[in-house]
């Protein structure tokens, strides 16, 4: 639904947009109906046209039904929304696909993203890991599992074009996954308040074809950015004062 | 500033006197305050089994003495209420002072206990168990001080035979402080 | 029955003799509920102006990043964060709550239930004084070294708990202390409201005879009381983290940042209904009077309000769907969140139903009341996107969220408050506000308001995330259409702010020079219109007795279309 | 009827307006009962049985609290509404616990773990098995004067605290239990 505003660039972007569409249709229908009735009443029952008001308690069935059917309508709509929302949620957050092409590690710092690519051997925690600041290189149509951490405060790993968002919590390692479906370069902003530099904390994700990715990997191997104290899953934050 | 009680204060549509009703609502809000703190503590206490080792360094004897002191002072508070019901302001004031004595004893024991613990290095920053220990007991201690102050004020009115219904109100508050301690005692001292 | 009234009367004469009070006694240290109500109102509105000015500064920065803001200067990230944080804090804790609950509650509850004052006048004054002190403390926090707190109004640790991270070693604890003190003030005030309604009602006033706004304010106070406790404890914990260096929220020392998020939102979500319900109550009063119509299904409104309040304790984690909570819990909270749409929809439908067969007079307060329903419906429907876990993955912390809750909070704290002010102004000061200027002010508020936030729904859907100092730092967000709509939103804000000047001029001019109003200018039923305008100390000459519900308008067989609550039924 | 209830409550008739009047000895007996319960709750843990400890410690705490509430606070003769209100407040707190425990009370869950909590637990055990000195954790000294007053820019890079974070705590190099 949102493709015309913002590209759907991951495997589950369309599913999430569908949830949004369903809610927009159901909610929008009731919203417009309610607003229409409201404006209609305001126009129809102006004092000039309706000098004497009715006296209605609203307790008798004849009038009450106009309110009470809304229970059923709302609950029915809620169930539909719930089914779609929970399915999308389960797909994105509660399950990880069986086949994972590569794993990456993401660490939020004040105020930069540290992306650990597994390097040529495809495994994290080996010497050929490629460790970059604010640059994440992935291959289109491959499934990635990420391990998200934070070194200091709360951050939020967000790729709007993937419809992906997950807070990075110090002390926690949170797993998630994505499959980019469109090649290109996209923003990876931090979307949780993380201090002074929150407004400049943004990485870029480079979704590349296999060839491009191989070329990049060759040029990048061995040139790992030195990030002092970068986390390899040891520990996130400590109070600086101790 | 001398102020005349409005008529509103003397009305009682529920049948519960206004002061007492307000006291119940106050206790209701206190329940959620202590509840939030203790629930946070319980969650971490259950999660971190090794905290039992830290809890082993709490002074169960001091805790037990304090429980005894508070229970006894609660008895005095209810006896003060009893005396106030008989319109015996002097006796009520006497029992209130006994209750305040209990509060002071409690604080003295607490002071000795804390001094000892801090001397052994168990400060509020030593680790999170001790942070909870001092925060919960400290918050409770503030309530003890507040209760004792309120009782002192009420006791002077009692001597003059004024506002005897307030003896019951401070009494209820004091029993609540007692109940909080009844839960703090096993949580901080006994469970090891 | 009559003897009671007479007895009350005798007391009121005896108690409130006409001894002259000095200005300070009368207006600064008064224990009179009306003076305290107005004090809350003025303080709240002043803080609201402060919050609005903050929004001017950061909205200008959003639209024209890098340019000096006229009248303020260059906005640095530090100032920006400070403005955003304190805008949120002020608008909720020092504007919406004091005005909606404390000001209207203090002013209206004793008048509407027919007694002479709150049950604890001195507690009431203490509550205001604590509130005032907390407001001053918050303002003072801007002027300490390193400036005020800038970690968002949610103040998530470890950012909020550690000066190394937030860079505001003094601002952050001061901010927290101010918020905690404000809670204490409202706890005291809330106890007073609840006890007053329960015990001090006029004789004859039964449960379903209480005006809706009084019910709503009291239900809101109960909600506040039940939800704020854990956060008060949490504030103490966070304060120790900030000042002593404990580790309640420090993962390296066994703490958990998510604990704070839960403590905060366990309060934070009921808080939404704490401010919503009084606004709903104000609108109910205004709607019935100017529609000359009985409130549709009074009991339904009351019980849906109670149901909303109860449900609001089960939904809080929808603010944390992607915040690192266990994803399985999100399903439970989605169900409860969607459930809350049932009572809210029903309440909205009841209000619309009240207009059926009515005789509507579109006076200024009525325009604001209708605008409240119109706008709040949009705010309510857009909330479903955020309560549904699947959609929230994308919308969380975008401008869509921001636009959604402004579509609820602005109708609540601005539009409904204006409805209430225009409606009760004759009671408060004995004079009318100018209706023509009121209408101009209405259109200048309701229309630009949509101009501010509808574009923000769009930019939010396009991926603008919140609390970002400068969106142009993000290549994908430096798009022409987004830049245009950000500017559009800011310009709308400027227009809306400019129109508020009309309100203030109208307010203060009418206070002294407005047309004199009689005791019951709108032909309303509730007790406050029985008292003189403005009501003297002690409110009523004879404390009223209640004979019927508050919304008996256009009763068949009566010559006048209203039937005050204190008027005895004709002998048959 | 509220009319009747509106009759003026004098200053005194509110105290002891309802409920039976007991002799003072009645309260002393309840106090004695409370003391017996106190002794049991202290003695319980000495038996060393974990389940028994929980029962004697917390079960008796609940009983004691109820006795104090009912007989000392006179909730037994108070309007039922007060019980309901206080109980509702407790329920709110329990609700808070239920919603929060799934995250805060656990080391791991669906797609998340808390590496630092594992570490913290390890370290905690080590600190306490290492004798009575409590070097590891007990040695932190509170130093609030050292609050940083750093201008923007100095801590801008994470280098500043990034490096001392590993030394400052003397963290063990052991990899926490989580999959990579």
Image: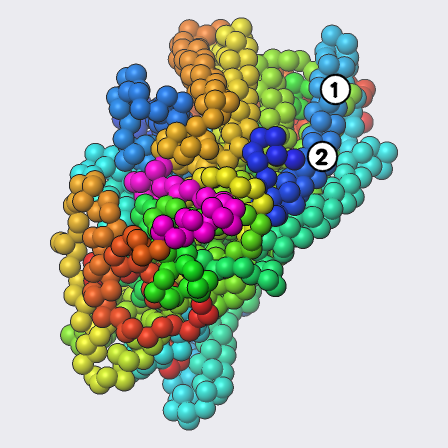
User: Does the magenta-highlighted stretch encompass residue C10?
Assistant: no
Q: Quadrant of residue A111?
A: top left
User: Does the magenta-highlighted stretch encompass residue A210?
Assistant: yes
* Residue A87 drawn at (x, y percent): 67, 53
Marks 1/2 same chain = yes
Horizontal relation, residue C56 to residue B114: left or right: right
Which residue carries the number 2 mark? A25
Residue most extreme to the bottom? D47
User: Where C564 falls versus C188 (above or below)?
Assistant: above
Q: Secondary structure at mark 2?
A: helix
Nearer to us of marks 1 and 2 is 2
Q: Residues within 10 Å of mark 2 (few under 14, many from 20)?
A: few
* Residue C415 drawn at (x, y percent): 53, 24
Mark found first going from the N terminus, 1 or 2: 2
Numbered disc 1: what chain?
A: A
Task: Compute the Cα span from label 1 to label 2.
Answer: 24 Å
Q: Which residues are magenta?
A: A192-220
Horizontal relation, residue A57 to residue B6: left or right: right
Q: Secondary structure at mark 1?
A: helix
Residue in front for this viewpoint, C450 or A187: A187
């Amino acid at each position: 639904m949102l493709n015309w505003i913002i590209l759907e660039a991951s495997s589950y972007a369309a599913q999430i947009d569908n949830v949004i569409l369903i809610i927009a249709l159901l909610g929008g229908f009731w919203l417009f109906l309610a607003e229409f009735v409201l404006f209609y009443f305001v126009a129809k029952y102006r004092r000039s046209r309706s000098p004497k008001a009715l006296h209605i308690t609203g307790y008798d069935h004849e009038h009450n039904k106009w309110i009470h059917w809304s229970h059923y309508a709302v609950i029915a709509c809620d169930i539909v929304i719930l089914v779609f929302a929970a399915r999308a949620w389960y797909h994105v957050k509660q399950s990880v696909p069986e086949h994972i092409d590569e794993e990456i590690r993401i660490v939020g710092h004040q105020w930069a993203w540290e992306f650990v690519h597994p390097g040529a051997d495809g495994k994290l925690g080996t010497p050929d890991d490629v460790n970059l600041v604010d640059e994440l290189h992935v291959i289109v149509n491959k499934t990635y599992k990420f391990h998200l951490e934070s070194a200091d405060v709360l951050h939020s790993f967000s790729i709007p074009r993937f419809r992906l968002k997950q807070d990075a919590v110090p002390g926690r390692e949170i797993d998630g996954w994505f499959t980019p479906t469109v090649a290109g370069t996209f923003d990876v902003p931090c979307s949780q308040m993380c201090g002074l530099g929150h407004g400049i904390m943004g990485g870029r994700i480079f979704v590349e074809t296999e060839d491009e990715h191989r070329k990049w990997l060759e040029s990048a191997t061995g040139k790992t950015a030195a990030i002092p104290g970068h986390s390899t899953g040891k520990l996130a934050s400590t109070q600086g004062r101790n | 500033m001398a102020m005349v009680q409005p008529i509103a204060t003397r009305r009682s549509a529920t049948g519960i006197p206004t002061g007492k009703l307000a006291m119940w609502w106050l206790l209701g809000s206190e329940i959620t305050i202590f509840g939030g703190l203790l629930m946070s503590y319980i969650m971490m206490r259950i999660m971190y089994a090794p905290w039992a080792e830290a809890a082993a360094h709490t002074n169960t004897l001091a805790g037990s003495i304090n429980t005894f002191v508070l229970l006894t002072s609660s008895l005095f508070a209810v006896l003060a209420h009893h005396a106030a019901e008989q319109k015996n302001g002097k006796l009520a004031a006497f029992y209130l002072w006994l209750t305040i004595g209990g509060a002071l004893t409690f604080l003295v024991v607490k002071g000795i206990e804390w001094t000892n613990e801090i001397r052994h290095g168990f400060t509020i920053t030593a680790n999170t168990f001790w942070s909870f220990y001092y925060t919960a007991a400290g918050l409770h201690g503030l309530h003890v001080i507040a209760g004792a102050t309120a009782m002192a004020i009420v006791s002077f009115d009692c001597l003059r035979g004024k506002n005897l219904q307030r003896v019951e109100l401070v009494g209820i508050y004091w029993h609540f402080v007692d109940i909080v301690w009844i839960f703090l005692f096993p949580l901080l001292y006994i469970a090891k | 029955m009559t003897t009671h009234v007479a007895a009350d009367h005798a007391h009121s004469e005896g108690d409130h003799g006409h001894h002259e009070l000095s200005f300070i006694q009368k207006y600064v240290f008064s224990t009179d509920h009306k003076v305290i109500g107005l004090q809350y109102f003025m303080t709240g509105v002043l803080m609201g102006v402060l919050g609005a000015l903050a929004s001017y500064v950061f909205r200008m920065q959003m639209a024209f990043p890098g340019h000096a803001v006229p009248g303020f200067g260059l906005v640095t990230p530090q100032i920006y964060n400070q403005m955003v944080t304190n805008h949120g804090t002020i608008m909720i804790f020092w504007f919406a709550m004091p005005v909606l609950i404390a000001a209207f509650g203090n002013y209206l509850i004793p008048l509407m239930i027919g007694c002479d004052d709150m049950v604890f006048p001195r507690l009431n004054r203490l509550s205001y004084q604590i509130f005032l002190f907390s407001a001053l403390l918050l303002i003072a926090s801007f002027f300490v070294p390193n400036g005020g707190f800038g970690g968002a109004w949610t103040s998530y640790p470890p950012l909020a708990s550690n000066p190394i991270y937030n860079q505001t070693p003094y601002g952050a604890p001061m901010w927290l202390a101010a918020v905690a003190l404000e809670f204490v003030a409202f706890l005291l005030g809330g106890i007073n409201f609840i006890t007053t309604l329960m015990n001090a009602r006029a004789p004859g006033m039964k449960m379903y005879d209480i005006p809706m706004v009084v019910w709503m304010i009291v239900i809101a106070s109960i909600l506040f009381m039940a939800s704020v406790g854990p956060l008060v404890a949490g504030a103490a914990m966070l304060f120790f983290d900030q000042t002593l260096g404990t580790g309640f929220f420090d993962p390296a020392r066994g703490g958990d940042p998510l604990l704070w998020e839960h403590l905060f939102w366990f309060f934070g979500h009921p808080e939404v209904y704490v401010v919503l319900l009084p606004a709903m109550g104000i609108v109910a009063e205004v709607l019935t009077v100017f529609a000359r119509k009985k409130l549709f299904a009074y009991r339904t409104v009351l019980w849906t309000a109670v149901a909303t309040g109860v449900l609001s304790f089960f939904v809080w984690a929808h603010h944390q769907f992607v915040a690192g909570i266990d994803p399985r819990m999100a399903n439970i909270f989605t169900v409860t969140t969607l459930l809350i749409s049932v009572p809210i929809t029903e309440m909205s439908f009841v209000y619309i139903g009240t207009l059926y067969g009515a005789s509507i007079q579109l006076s200024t307060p009525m325009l604001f009341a209708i605008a409240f329903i119109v706008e709040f419906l949009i705010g309510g429907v857009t909330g479903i996107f955020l309560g549904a876990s699947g959609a929230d993955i994308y919308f969380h912390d975008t401008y869509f969220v921001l636009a959604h809750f402004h579509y609820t909070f602005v109708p609540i704290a601005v539009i409904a408050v204006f409805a209430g002010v225009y409606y009760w102004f004759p009671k408060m000061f004995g004079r009318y506000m100018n209706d023509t200027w009121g209408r101009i002010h209405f259109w200048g508020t309701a229309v630009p308001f949509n101009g501010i936030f509808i574009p923000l729904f769009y930019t939010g859907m396009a991926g603008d995330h919140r609390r970002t100092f400068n969106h142009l730092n993000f290549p994908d967000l430096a798009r022409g259409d987004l830049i245009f709509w950000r500017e559009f939103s800011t310009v709308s804000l400027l227009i809306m702010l400019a129109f508020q000047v009309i309100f203030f001029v109208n307010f203060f001019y009418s206070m002294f020079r407005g047309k004199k109003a009689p005791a019951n200018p709108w032909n309303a039923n509730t007790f406050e219109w029985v008292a003189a305008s403005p009501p003297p100390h002690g409110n009523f000459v004879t404390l009223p007795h209640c004979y019927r519900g508050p919304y008996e308008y256009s009763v068949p067989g009566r010559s006048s279309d209203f039937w005050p609550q204190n008027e005895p039924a004709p002998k048959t | 009827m509220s009319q009747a209830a509106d009759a003026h409550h004098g200053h005194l008739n509110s105290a002891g307006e309802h409920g039976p009047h007991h002799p003072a000895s009645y309260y002393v007996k309840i106090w004695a009962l409370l003391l017996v319960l106190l002794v049991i709750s202290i003695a319980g843990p000495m038996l060393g049985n974990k389940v028994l400890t929980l029962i004697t410690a917390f079960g008796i705490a609940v009983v004691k609290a109820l006795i104090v509430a009912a007989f000392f606070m006179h909730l037994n003769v108070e309007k039922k509404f007060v019980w309901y209100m206080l109980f509702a407040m407790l329920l709110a707190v329990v609700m808070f616990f239920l919603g929060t425990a799934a995250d805060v009370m656990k080391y791991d869950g669906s797609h998340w773990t808390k590496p630092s909590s594992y570490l913290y637990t390890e370290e905690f055990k080590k600190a306490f098995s290492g004798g009575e000195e409590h070097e590891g954790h007990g040695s932190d000294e509170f130093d609030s004067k050292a609050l940083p007053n750093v201008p923007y820019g100095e801590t801008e890079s994470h280098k500043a605290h990034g490096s001392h974070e590993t030394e400052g705590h003397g963290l063990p190099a052991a990899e926490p239990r989580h999959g990579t």
